[in-house]
Image: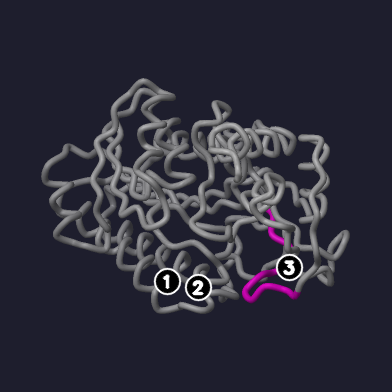
Amino acid sequence: MNILVTGGAGYIGSHTCVALLEAGHTVMVADNLCNSQAETLERVKQITGREITFYQIDVTDEAATNTVFASQSIDGVIHFAGLKAVGESVAKPLVYYYNNLVSTMVLAKACQKYGVKRFVFSSSATVYGENQVPFVESMPLLPSTNPYGESKAISERMLTDIAKANPDWSVALLRYFNPVGAHASGLIGEVPTGIPNNIMPYITQVAKGKLDKLRVFGNDYPTVDGTGVRDYIHVLDLAEGHVTALDKLTKGVHVYNLGTGHGISVLQLVKAFEEANDLHLPYEITARRPGDIAECYADASKAKRDWGWTAKRDLVDMCRDAWRFESVSKEPSP
């Protein structure tokens, strides 16, 4: 199939491009590079030996987006393009609502106009709000603790309503948890702009000496050691889940968690990284971060039952691959 990947130069998007190309699909990428680099797509080509057609556009721009659809034969869309930092969304809610909702509306409108009926949406476990863990797809969505999560939930509702009005549409709403790790080649991985919002690049930058210590946001949660618990999934498992979604997708709206089904605390992750890479990580406990919840992990049984998909890589793989990308693929710290 010919697949348009929005946000395809980003962390999850670029790994999904690799998985799509290796599965034999043709890939087009639309990305405004606000939190990514064009060089990443060159590295995807290096890994796969396949070409990617790249459009440097913002998919909130309807005219630019229509130009892409008019110039290509597109069979399906995987929509990653969006802002994703929970804390930043609390500080800048309007920016998040505009970017994340308008991009979804513009893409859905273009799909209607150009007859594209397969749509895979990058959602998030944040749509569950403060439901009881493990999170199950059948749970009612609760008001999120942050605008980022709300923007994902509203996008899900929009796509559900559009699919109801267009019965020949096939929509996958993929709620995923905390992607970490990198491609085993060390060529692509997570490259945040500025100080990382996500924990693994923060850990790897501390390990490399770029940052002095890891800041752990809160140790007074009702968890195994007081730190937040998350379901960390290898980014390659997540990428393969998107390819599986495209292959298995049927008419209607289908909701799936993509996670491991296991909760790991921040301090457990720190210990696993230290042991996997024989390193020491200095850290300090700071105040809780606005918008965070105590625990977030998946019931991942539906994807296994319906698709035969499960996360195959373990926490050691995640930690080793993330450190390989940080330590091998980039210039050493001064």
On the image, numbered disc 2 is attached to which residue?
A: 89
> Magenta span has 28?
no
Q: Secondary structure at mark 2?
A: helix
Task: Say the numbered circle drawn on residue 123.
Answer: none
On the image, numbered disc 1 is attached to which residue?
A: 96
Q: Quadrant of the N terminus?
A: top left
Does residue 172 appear left or right of residue 54 in this picture?
Answer: right
Choose mark 3 or mark 1, whichever is in front.
3
> Magenta span has 289?
yes
Q: In the rendering, at what x and y percent does residue 306 appear?
A: 55, 37
Q: In the rendering, at what x and y percent does residue 192 appear?
A: 51, 53
Does residue 136 appear left or right of residue 242 in this picture?
Answer: right
Q: In the rendering, at what x and y percent does residue 89 appear?
A: 50, 73
Name the N-terminal-most of marks 3 and 1: 1
Residue 275 lies, with reference to residue 49, above or below; the image says below
Amino acid on which the number 2 mark rests in the picture: Ser
Does residue 43 appear left or right of residue 224 in this picture?
Answer: left
Amino acid on which the number 3 mark rests in the picture: Phe
On the image, numbered disc 3 is attached to which residue?
A: 217
Q: Which residues are magenta?
A: 287-297
Residue 50 lies, with reference to residue 112, above or below; the image says above
To which quarter of the image does residue 330 belong?
top right
Can the viewer see residue 6 in this picture?
Answer: yes
Q: Quadrant of the C terminus?
A: top right
Name the N-terminal-most of marks 2 and 1: 2
Amino acid on which the number 1 mark rests in the picture: Tyr
Is there a contact, CB below 8 Å, between mark 2 and mark 1? yes
- Counting every numbered tag in the picture gives 3
